[in-house]
Image (spheres, rainbow, N blue to C red):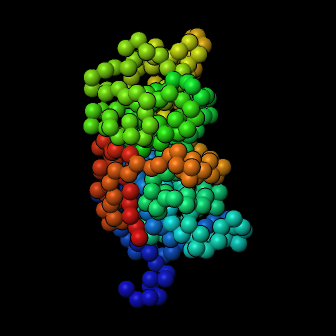
Amino acid sequence: MSSSLWRNTHESNRYTKYGSPDVLELKEVEKPTLKDNEVLIKIHAASVNAYDWHFLTADIFLIRLMGGGLLKPKYTRLGADVAGRVEAVGRNVKQFQPDDEVFGDISHGGFAEYGYAPDNRLALKPANLSFEEAAAVPMAALTALQGLRDEGQIHPGQKVLINGASGGVGTFAVQIAKSFGAEVTAVCSPRNLDQVRSIGADHVIDYTKENFTKNGQQYDLILAANGYHPLSAYKRALTPKGIYVMAGGSMAQIFQAMLMSSWMSETGGKKMGGVSAKIDQKDLGLIKELIEASKVKPVIDKRYSLNEVPEALRYLGAGHARGKVIITVV
Ligand SMILES: NC(=O)c1ccc[n+]([C@@H]2O[C@H](COP(=O)([O-])OP(=O)(O)OC[C@H]3O[C@@H](n4cnc5c(N)ncnc54)[C@H](OP(=O)(O)O)[C@@H]3O)[C@@H](O)[C@H]2O)c1
């Protein structure tokens, strides 16, 4: 590749129709021109989220109705979570400068050598993390933080249960709930029991052996990151003023929370609801502080290269990732 070509183009995973990971193509494309409030990032690492899977496959029909593109994808780039080095900044960007190490959620376009986003979607990378570790953080940790703190109103000493504790959101949720001083029960399969204990879970439940909604225990807060239980079962497992927060899981779990949770909340003091994570620079900063204070550490499962993004998506899409799946770019 000639040096002028290198300066003006970069490799990026693109797709033009919804489908399996096979529809993705690694293409040589022009480097973007920045708007005044945007930052160009030389991406060192990205991480894969269910969000990317949904935008790739449109398996949730709402993706098409809510801005993803009705018949074909509106966004042709994938990859939300990134970490890298600032290459250039738009003229109104004051908080970052070239060479700064940053991480954040750019929404689309992270599975590439370069990505860009408004500056308020980024924060300085935690000093004690590698780029790969930092790329694991944004979406999953924000979901866990906002689910526990904003929707779940978590307090020290509360009994908190995380269902789906071994995945991307769950591994952050266990650690963030502990950092709030909660007593945490993690629900996962037997192969992940040691992992969730090692990140601080006080109690573990193997979902293949025990149904936590039927064992008589009750929790002040339940974060449902994965799996499925009927809302009525979750409600039974809550203390009288307990709160249920749905972050994700099976389609049935997601639809029930969307359609029935407010109705369920009206019957008694228990609250049933969901979290929809928002990119928030202040929250990214808070998570950076938790990481730098060694209260939270990303759990990384597998690493793939830029031309293995389809494989990485297939692995995540199978639903059994243990922590985060990383795309190593540099
Ligand atoms: N609301 C939001 O804003 C938001 C943001 C991000 C993600 N999400 C959603 O949150 C969900 C979780 O995301 P994620 O990144 O954590 O996914 P993930 O990393 O793909 O989750 C995989 C993990 O889930 C566990 N799991 C699978 N079936 C389970 C079951 N029946 N019970 C308990 N654990 C089970 C798997 O462990 P085993 O293989 O051992 O079972 C695996 O460790 C997804 O549905 C995603 O769409 C929502």
Residue 14 higher or lower than 136, as above or below:
below
Count of labels in the image: 0
Q: Position of residue 299 (x, y in %)?
A: 40, 48
- Which residue is found at the position 51% from the left and 23% from the top? 159
Image quarter of the N terminus: bottom left
Residue 294 higher or lower than 266, as above or below:
below
Q: Position of residue 309 (x, y in %)?
A: 34, 59
Q: Quadrant of residue 23?
A: bottom left
299 vs 288, left or right, is left
Q: Quadrant of residue 224?
A: top left
Question: In the image shown, does 126 or 249 lie closer to the viewer?
Answer: 126
- Which residue is found at the position 49% from the left and 20% from the top? 219
209 vs 218, left or right, is left
- Which residue is found at the position 39% from the left and 23% from the top? 229
Q: Position of residue 239 (x, y in %)?
A: 53, 15
Image quarter of the C terminus: bottom left
Question: In the image shown, does 211 or 258 lie closer to the viewer?
Answer: 211
Residue 92 higher or lower than 123, as above or below:
below
Q: Is residue 82 visible?
A: no
Q: Position of residue 32 (x, y in %)?
A: 54, 72
Q: Is residue 291 visible?
A: yes
- Which residue is found at the position 29% from the left and 56% from the top? 311
